[in-house]
Amino acid sequence: MFRKAITTRFAKDERGTVVILWGTAMVAFIGFFAITLDVGRLSSTHAELQSFADNVALAAAAELDGQPDALTRSTNAAVNLISRNQTFADGARTLSGAAEFTLTFYSALPASDEDPLEASDITTEPRLAKFAHVALTPRSLSMNMASALNRMVGGDGFAATNLTAEAVAGFAKAACDIAPLMFCLPPNWETDLTVGDQILLRSGGGGGGASEPPWGPGNFGFIDLELFGDVEGACENEGGNQLACLIAAQEAITQCVLTNGFDTEPGQKEGITTAAFNTRFDMFGSTLSGGKNKEIYAPAPNVIKGIHNDTGGACIQGGEDPTPDTIALGRDNCFGTDTCAHGNRFGNGSWDRQAYLNANHDLSHLDANPDGVGSDLHLPPLVGTNAVFAGTRYGMYLREIAYGNDPLNANAPSLLNPSLSETGRPICSSHMSSNPARRVVNTVGVDCAVNPVSGKTKNVPASTFISVFLTEPVGADGLSPPNFDIYGEIVGFPEVSGVGNGGNGFGGIFRDVVQLYR
């Protein structure tokens, strides 16, 4: 009876039920906590791996400039420059070095990010490589907490999870509002070319094909117009004269061009003559003979050139003769003795400044200068950032403009003594540019020794951009096809401030564009 009472009372006793509920809930809670912790470790590790892959791809892509050693530099940057830490995966905590990833270069990407990369786009050619694909070596991550719980309830635990990451980055050099003009650089141009040096650019290519000999230092040509024409720019309606317009116009003329792989345009194009360059000198001949009243072709504020129309008219549109009393800014002395570097194409900045002063700034009419020797004492000094041009032809040009703009100058707006046959101001065009850089052309410099150019050459990388001041009108030799000679003075490296003893930028927009695509 007593035992039955105890049993009955125990069976009816509900105390402790909550312990069972708590025990069941605790198992579920621990399981949820374990899974959350492992998933958090998994997510954190994948984020660390992805960050590493992204940065390796960006470092590799930043070197894909099309130069012959681009892939070597790209690989070295990926291997040596980037390291990251990972916290939970098996193996070393530091992510660094070639063993951590596979690097593959591509010439193109599919139009849609949803499409896989094409094996046919893989390249080992530096000129064609524009994208770097990084695939990390998988790292394993043990699901410790979840496995322990699984074993507690009789399971076999969970296998380690393999994690990896991929990234694709690309590089492009973009240039906007530059002339579609390129030339071959001399060896060691990085140290040999500096502000004040004169160069003789002579047309190359001759209209032939790839069978022609490769261009040498100082040869120039044009860049494929399809890359340059801005459909909303100043030259949109010029038709067959588009290239002439792109060279001659002073307004925003070109769209942005990716210069780590442009195509050259061989030969002398129809309608392209010296006139394309010489509008800057108030000369309107050939295809641009009707452009003298167009503001986009406004001449520079200083057009001293030492020549005049041989028929006596104001406009030089055909024949020309030297003026009896003025001369153009002089050439480097070595050009006269055929001793300039690299086939008499690159001078050293030494020119006969005094001869120019004697011809164009003879102040013998002043009592203070009775001997007739030219002097520049009346010209304002160069100030500010223009001081770097002291002694250069461009510096003389700037000082003459400042003299003509000086309200205290009795001869203003003439740049020279009004008794001379040139005033220095345009007299043919009805417009005049207010920008002294009107006679400066931003050109593309190519290392043709390592990137040979002959005829129509594709994917030519730009090595640098050089601002060239036209020291005299562009001339032709009269042969068929004509050989054009451009004498210009280096006045700057617009994409890199301070290169070549400094120098100011002269228009144009230059950007290195490195970005992740996947």
Image: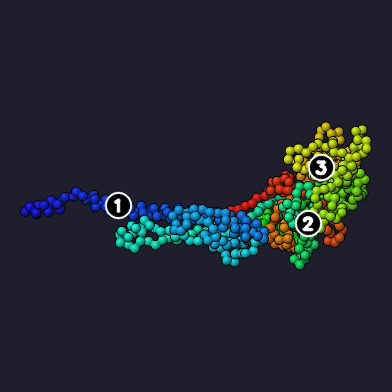
**Which amino acid type is marked by label 2?**
Gly
Residue 159: % across, % down: 39, 62
Residue 279: % across, % down: 81, 49
**Residue at the image position 91 percent from the left and 46 percent from the top:** 323
**Which amino acid type is marked by label 1?**
Met
Q: Secondary structure at mark 3?
A: helix
Residue placed under numbered mark 2 in the picture: 218
**Residue at the image position 83 percent from the left and 50 percent from the top:** 332
- Between 493 and 299, the one lying in front of the other is 493
Q: Nearer the viewer, mark 2 or mark 1?
A: 2
**Residue at the image position 74 percent from the left and 57 percent from the top:** 187
**Which amino acid type is marked by label 3?**
Met
Q: Secondary structure at mark 1?
A: helix
Q: In the displayed image of the protein, which residue is found farthest to the left?
A: 1
**Residue at the image position 30 percent from the left and 59 percent from the top:** 153
Point out the image quarter for the C terminus.
Answer: bottom right
Q: CA distance from mark 2 to mark 1?
A: 82 Å
Which numbered disc, 1 or 3, marks the residue that appears first in the sequence? 1
Considering only vertical position in the picture, is 233 above or below 483? above
Q: Are marks 3 and 2 in contact (CB under 8 Å)?
A: no
Residue 363 at least partly seen = yes
Residue placed under numbered mark 1 in the picture: 26
- Between 245 and 52, the one lying in front of the other is 52
Which numbered disc, 2 or 1, marks the residue that appears first in the sequence? 1
Considering only vertical position in the picture, is 397 above or below 69? above
Residue 297 at least partly seen = no
Residue 317: % across, % down: 86, 50
The image quarter containing residue 57 is bottom right
Residue placed under numbered mark 3 in the picture: 396
Residue 410: % across, % down: 86, 33
